[in-house]
Amino acid sequence: MTRPRIESVQAARLAALLAELRAGNPFYGPRLAKAGLGDGGTTLADFVARMPFTTKMDLVWDREEFPPYGSNLTYPIGRYTRFCQSSGTTRAPMPTLDTPESWSAMLDCWDRVYEAAAIPPGERIFFAFSFGPFLGFWTAFESATRRGNLAIPGGGLSSKARLQTMVAHDVETLCCTPTYALRLGELYATHRDDETAAYRLRKIIVAGEPGGSLPEVRKRLAELWKGARVHDHHGMTETGPVTYEDPEKPLALCVLEDSYLAEIIDRDTQLEVVPGQRGELVLTTLTRTASPLLRYRTGDLVEKAYFQPPGGGEPVLCLEGGILGRIDEMVVIRGVNVYPSAVEKIIRGFPEVVEFQVVQTTRQSMAELEVMIEAGAKAGPDLAGRVARELGDAFTLRIPVTAVEPGSLPRYEFKSKRWIKR
């Protein structure tokens, strides 16, 4: 498989990035010098062979040593105008700064997400976010305004108020997490009235969770929203927007390869996997020069594939099935490797399940799982038993499933926390 144009663009942008970092970035400058990179003539193969990985702990330790922003800043602090930070789900939130130029490069990435979803300028987009300091909210919103869309923020509104706002302003596209799209859809289905019945929603762009590329979740969303098309996307505060979904390649995420050099590596050998194999996604930001990452180990489990655009052109690297899970979230239950995303995929195959929670406990030094589900009004008999049998068949494990009272499990607006440890 030859991809000369893509690799030529990546090589040119990588060379320019490394030269800039070697000259002015206190975090990466010494690392590049030690690896013998960044002084001209670096090929993609040289870079992959000689540049060490960057890990999340490298960034955490750097911020602890050089608080509060760390030393991974290519320019003087006065050039930076944008502040964002990670969600801090496993440790304290990690701040990230950007210059106007790097910020604009990330808006360019979001432009591609909107273009792939066939959202023209002038279309109205509703953002059902609380608008905290997370990068994805702001880049999605500002890209929409820059390209001429009417961007409507939903921060601070109740779910019903958001539905009413979408109707009042003829919103055609919704941006939110898969979890919240389900929640809004269920609210619409159960509390439909004259104020919310006339919505025009046709597209839903989701991110933040693996559910956007799960067929079961997409089917449920289409049912709730009367056939609205779901478009998945993923990114992270550390890197920016990384992928988009091509309408000709559903249930996969295409990498924005002119902005990212992506590798998919075997965790044990640390070598590139072949198409059809799974591995960890490693990213180098080619256009976010102000706060870059080189060979960053994301911890995302993905399957390598290529997509040939129907209109011609070179094959595009894509992630089959989207983000399959987090490598660091895998648990071993009586000798069986279990990923939370695999459990969710099975549970979402039961449309009668409105919400669920997985509880992980340790008994006599062994990890155990238990699932709690909320059933909808149209649930059939023995729903808990049927879910338990499906989980048992999939994992060859006995995983107890208990039906709980409607409304007793927590609901989420941002990233869900359905997997808890006790």
Image (cartoon, helix red, strand yellow):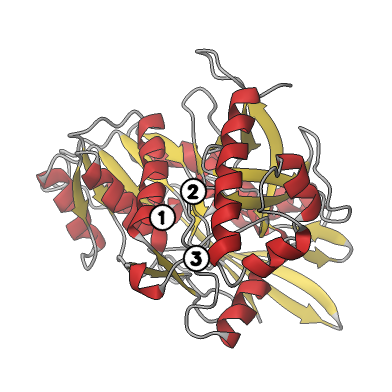
- Kindly identify the amino acid type of the residue bearing the numbered disc 2: Thr
Taking the image as shown, residue 406 lies to the left or right of residue 295, namely: left
Q: Which residue is mark 3?
A: 74
Label 2 packing within 10 angstroms: few (<14), some (14-19), many (20+): many
Image quarter where the C terminus lies is: bottom right
- Kindly identify the amino acid type of the residue bearing the numbered disc 1: Ser
Taking the image as shown, residue 260 lies to the left or right of residue 170, namely: right
- Kindly identify the amino acid type of the residue bearing the numbered disc 3: Thr
Would you say the residues marked 2 and 1 are in contact, meaning their CB atoms lie under 8 Å apart?
yes
Label 1 packing within 10 angstroms: few (<14), some (14-19), many (20+): many
Mark 2 or 3, closer to the camera? 3
In three-dimensional space, the C-alpha distance between marks 2 and 1, rounded to whole angstroms, equals 7 Å
Disc on the earlier residue, 3 or 1: 3
The extreme top residue here reads 311
Above or below for 299 versus 12: below
Counting every numbered tag in the picture gives 3
* Observer-nearest of 52 and 225: 52
Helix, strand or loop for disc 2: loop
Residue 155: percent from the left, percent from the top? 24, 64
Q: Which residue occupies 68% across, 69% down?
A: 30
Residue 131: percent from the left, percent from the top? 30, 65
Above or below for 122 versus 399: above
Image quarter where the N terminus lies is: top right
- The reply to whether residue 151 is visible in this rendering is yes
* Observer-nearest of 319 and 206: 319
Disc on the earlier residue, 2 or 1: 1
Above or below for 145 versus 298: above
Above or below for 342 versus 88: above
Q: Which mark is residue 102?
A: 1
In three-dimensional space, the C-alpha distance between marks 2 and 3, rounded to whole angstroms, equals 13 Å
Q: Which mark is residue 287?
A: 2
Q: Which residue occupies 30% across, 45% down?
A: 174
